Image (cartoon, helix red, strand yellow):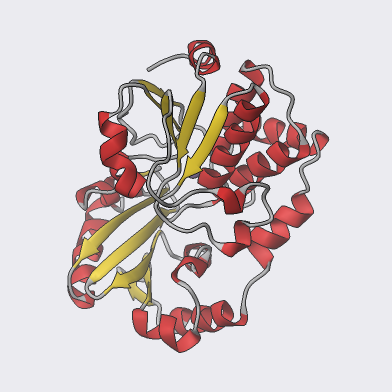
Amino acid sequence: MINLNKLAEKIKGETSVALFLHIRPDGDAIGSALALKGALTKLGIKVDAYCDDTIPERFWYLKGATEIKNGEIEGEYSALIAVDSAEINRLGKYAVLFNEFKNTYLIDHHETNRGYSKNDYVLGLSANCVNIFALINELNVEIDSDIANALATGILTDTGNLKHKGVESSTIHTLATLVEKGADLNLINYKMFTAQSPARAKLFGLTMQKIRYFKDGKIAIATVSQVNISLSGAKQDETEGFIDFVMGITGVEVGACLLELENNKYKISLRGKSTNVAEIAEVFGGGGHILASGCQIKGEHEEVIDKLVYACKQHIKE
Ligand SMILES: [Mn+2]
């Protein structure tokens, strides 16, 4: 693990950089990449950002969001930097190149991240954008309103609008500084937490009326099925926030939202009120944070639920 000072020093020496976001990019990944891109560009470094998935439309209010590349790597880079990605395979099709490249960096905040670059910087704060903010300060780059909005988006989305457990005071201090630099929290809140398409509203209803409970209501599972996705007309990337609704149900200790990516393949978001759900996710090869994690499980719906409920029961403390 490299320290912040060394990280900034080394990055300053780069001439051209490719940034990598994780697949199914969220606000923290997009915010991290766009803010870092903005800052490094100010230092005269050529920067491109890549993501092996499209950037959902609701993030397009951020400057540069539509310029994130999706295709093959173009040109030569002196360094590759992964942001907000707990594991190398979350870089999707870019994972192989990243793994083989001579000069790589990783800037992340997931406690389960064991490192996979030549220069790992992993600090378990509640949003990776707080790490990026610290780096930008260390680089002595002035934060403008575009960078401020990108970083504030990451902080607000990864902390559930500051509602999650364990949001550090340093994160809130960072956010206050970003407001001074021109971050528009009202706009970010509207785009991230309020605005939704009629299709998403329909999918929400279809999903929530079928929530299933186990262990006397301590475990709640919602499934976003392919059938309901097509019935509603919503997109797969419009399910962010569904899990938070599940966690709001009285008595629920562990919540899961199953997203059917394709037939017999589920992407699972896990949340705990006090249960370590990172351990549950790790049972299935996933990971994340203690109270918010994710994994994928293949199999028939009922079989996936059985496996998941069994693992949850093993980890819920009586
Ligand atoms: Mn994150």
Say which residue appears at 64% left-offset and 59% top-offset: 192
Q: How many marks?
A: 0
Residue under the point 30% across and 39% down: 88
Residue 160 appears in the picture as rendered:
no
Report whether 289 appears left or right of 165: left
Image location of residue 250, percent across then percent down: 50, 67
Q: Position of residue 106 (x, y in %)?
A: 41, 29
Q: Position of residue 202 (x, y in %)?
A: 54, 84
Residue at horizontal 73%, vertical 29%? Answer: 143
Q: Is residue 58 above or below residue 159?
A: below
Q: Say left or right for 92 vs 149.
A: left
Residue 36, can we see it? Answer: yes
Residue beneath the point at 63% across and 24% down:
136
Front-most of 135 and 146? 146
Q: Quadrant of the N terminus?
A: top left
Up-down relation of residue 32 to residue 221 (above or below): above
Q: Nearer the viewer, residue 318 or 310?
A: 310
Q: Position of residue 66 (x, y in %)?
A: 59, 54
The one nearer the camera, 311 or 281, is: 281
In this rendering, the answer to whether 225 lies above or below 37 is below
- Residue sticking out furthest to the bottom: 231
